[in-house]
Amino acid sequence: VQLVESGGGLVQPGGSLRLSCAASGFTFSSYIMSWYRQAPGKERELAANIGGAGRSTNYADSVKGRFTISRDNAKNTVYLQMNSLKPEDTAVYYCNAKARGDYWGRGTQVTVSS
């Protein structure tokens, strides 16, 4: 099983980034896919998740209206479009797959700073 995140980087406040998580080794469409984040000195928190068919989504209040989670089951990939980024969005973002198993990627750093 592999989850490989990409798309992180340094962006100015108000900017946008799109994270991707490429999955392999399990039945992707059967898993709830999530993006978690962990800021320095803080606990890991859920940012957003999406059901297997892509019809149901949930967002943390702190990102609602700014982030959009989506998935492409044909490509075994989940995305997180992040708009109107704020300095408090700075964190390592982790991809998670949960169903019969519970799998994590290594994370990608997102830094929002001027």
Image (tube, grey):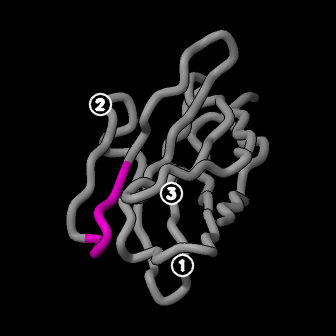
- Counting from the top left corner in percent of width and height, residue 9 is at 77, 47
Decide which of tag 3 and tag 2 comes sooner along the chain. 2
Q: CA distance from mark 3 to mark 2?
A: 15 Å
Marks 1 and 2 in Cβ contact (< 8 Å): no
Q: Residue at x 49, y 50 (%)?
A: 102
Crowding near pointer 3: few (<14 within 10 Å), some, many (20+)?
Answer: many
Q: SS for tag 2?
A: loop
Q: Where is mark 2, residue-wise?
A: 61
78 is within the stretch colored magenta: no
Q: Where is mark 1, residue-wise?
A: 76
Q: Where is mark 3, residue-wise?
A: 80
In this rendering, position of residue 60 left or right of residue 77: left
Where is residue 10, by image quadrant? top right
Quarter occupied by the N terminus: bottom right
Tag 3: amino acid: Leu
Crowding near pointer 1: few (<14 within 10 Å), some, many (20+)?
Answer: some
Decide which of tag 1 and tag 2 comes sooner along the chain. 2
From what the image shows, is residue 17 above or below residue 79? above
Q: SS for tag 3?
A: strand
In magenta, the rendered stretch is: 49-54
52 is within the stretch colored magenta: yes
Q: CA distance from mark 3 to mark 1?
A: 14 Å
Q: SS for tag 1?
A: loop
Tag 1: amino acid: Asn
- Counting from the top left corner in percent of width and height, residue 104 is at 61, 49
- Counting from the top left corner in percent of width and height, residue 40 is at 69, 16
